[in-house]
Amino acid sequence: MTENRGLRRMGLLLCLVWLFFAAFPLYWVLVTAFKPPLAVSQGPTYIPFVDFRPTVQAFRDAFAGLRGDFVGPIVSSILVSVTATVLSVFLGTMAAYALVRFTFRIRLLAGVAFAVISIGGFILLDTLTTLRVPHALLTVLVTALPVAVWLNGRALPGPVLGNDDVTFWFVSQRIFPPIVSAFAIYLLYAEMGKIGLPLLDTFGGMVIVYTAFGLPFAVWLMRDFLTTVPLEVEEAAMVDNIGRMRIFFQIVLPMAMPGLIATSMIVLAFVWNEFLFALLLTTGDWQTLPILLAGQNSSRGDEWWAISVAALISIGPMVLVAAILGRMMRSGLLSGSIK
């Protein structure tokens, strides 16, 4: 008993140490945001009303535009993040449902043929013709896709990939560093602008790239949630001559609502904090909060009170999301059980 009590105290002590290291940076940002400049520049001060008198002047300066536009990036982050999250979760849920309820058999040689036709055809068109890059891409994709589908229906030799392989392919899109695709997307967006379809620094361009960014997470997470939906419920609906689309929207989605909420919050957190794509694909109109936060320096040096205000504005919504998610987990709403 004494030994167990000692281990319990040791575990509690380690948890408290971890809590201090995890919470102190957040506390430091919080109190710095309310410090006057003199309290920051004269040395460390820790306790409001004891070491310094709190002020909201840094917040007034931020929203007055003295350190650049704050309201624009906030609105941009909300609009882009929410729209991209809704699209990612919706498309990812449909893909995950297909992976759970249908059997896929994809011949490896058909995939190789698609890659060869796409890449080789694009190189040939770009070298031998005067087609713009978007037109060349569209041409080779329209050609390669039906050829690959036709080949997949033939009795080709070689491995046959299944549902688990397709799921891994989705997840593998997040294994590569984002910089691998970021410059390619930037060049593609620039070419799209040359044919009259501007995507750089636009709402549509940001939503497209962030939807693709969040889609692998949505597929991966929703596949596990949808496996808990009883197949018998769908079979009973089919007996009543209810179509597959109605089953998905009116039966499966309501039963998977806890998973939808959890997945949406996780995808939203990833999209909200994404920095690289926003840095490369925006110049001003649709810059998001991470870009605003990174740009909080001036010719007078680092004004930490203003940087702390920007940090609070940036992390505040995600702290709220984490609190809601934690509350739902504690209440058992995200346990994945279907009654």
Image (cartoon, rainbow, N blue to C red):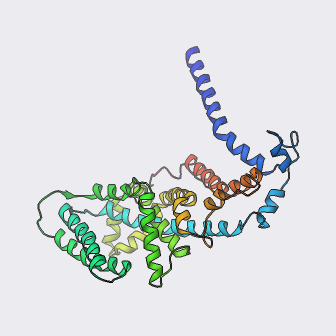
Residue sitting nearer the eye, 220 or 339: 220
Residue positioned 40% across, 54% down in the render: 176
In the figure, is residue 293 to the left or right of 116?
right
Q: Residue 6 falls in which quadrant of the image? A: top right
* x then y, percent, for residue 36: 84, 50
Image quarter in which the N terminus is found: top right
The number of numbered discs placed on residues in the rendered structure image is: 0
* x then y, percent, for residue 185: 44, 68
Give the residue at the far top of this rendering.
2
Residue sitting nearer the eye, 201 or 55: 201
Residue positioned 25% across, 78% down in the render: 143
Residue positioned 84% across, 57% down in the render: 57
* x then y, percent, for residue 267: 51, 59
Q: Residue 245 falls in which quadrant of the image? A: bottom left
Residue sitting nearer the eye, 165 or 274: 274
In the figure, is residue 56 to the left or right of 182?
right
Q: Is residue 90 above or below residue 316?
A: below
Image quarter in which the C terminus is found: bottom left
Residue positioned 71% across, 68% down in the render: 71
In the figure, is residue 142 to the left or right of 95?
left
In the figure, is residue 42 to the left or right of 272?
right
* x then y, percent, for residue 92: 42, 64
Residue sitting nearer the eye, 286 or 295: 295
Q: Is residue 111 above or below residue 38?
A: below
